[in-house]
Image (tube, rainbow, N blue to C red):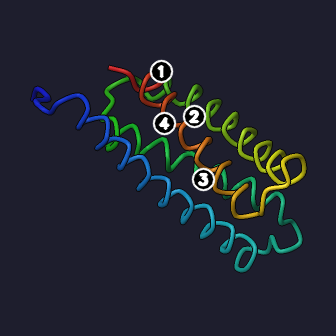
Amino acid sequence: MENTQKPSFLWLKQAVKFGIVGVLNTAVDLGAYFVLTRWLGMAGLPVAAKSISYSLGILNSFFWNKTWTFRSNASTWKTLIPFVLVSLVGLGMNTGGMQLGLNVLHFPELVALALATVFTLAWNFIFSKFVIFRK
């Protein structure tokens, strides 16, 4: 079925879907962290638990963005590695932005958090839309 939506509307629709997937990813990350640390005996290994839960969030993000947000038919194996790499760069940008906002620019915590999140969200969306899942 051919897409008959105007490009600007499609772009906005994808951005909203991307944001919804981001909320779901956060729920997966936090939920998995809770299960790992509270129910599966990883309470003494919080960093390991967080790396596992964050990874599950990335995989969740890949699945929903590939199938729902961008409706990509591209090979999973050709898109998964670039998606993970872009996500990891985004993680670095997010933590670096937080560091910059708090310790260099001396922004209040919520301002630094919001700015780091907005820049990371933009980075991840642009790369997902125009590089990883481009038509």
Residue 83 image-quadrant placement: top right
Q: Are marks 2 and 4 in contact (CB under 8 Å)?
A: yes
User: For the residue labelled by badge 1, is the local secondary structure a helix, a strand or a loop?
Assistant: helix
**Residue type at numbered disc 1:** Val
> Which quadrant of the rendered structure holds the N terminus?
top left
Q: Secondary structure at mark 3?
A: helix
Q: Could you tell me residue 100's position as x and y percent?
A: 83, 45
Question: In the image, what residue occupies the spot 84% across and 48% down?
Answer: 105
The residue that mark 2 highlights is 123
Question: Looking at the picture, does residue 113 appear above or below residue 37?
Answer: above
The residue located at (14%, 33%) in the rendering is: 5
Crowd around label 3: few <14 · some 14–19 · many ≥20 (10 Å):
some
Can you identify the residue that label 3 sits on?
Answer: 56
Q: Disc 3 marks which amino acid? A: Leu
Q: Residue at the bottom extreme?
A: 38
**Residue depth check, mark 4 versus mark 1: number of the one nearer the observer:** 4
Q: Residue at x 75, y 39 (%)?
A: 92
The nearer-to-camera label among 3 and 1 is 1
The answer for how far apart the CA atoms under marks 3 and 4 are is 19 Å
Viewer-proximal residue, 27 or 96? Answer: 96
Alpha-carbon distance for marks 4 and 1?
A: 10 Å
> Dot 4 corresponds to which residue?
125
Identified by mark 4, the residue type is: Phe
The mark found on residue 93 in the picture is none
| Pointer 1 residue | 131
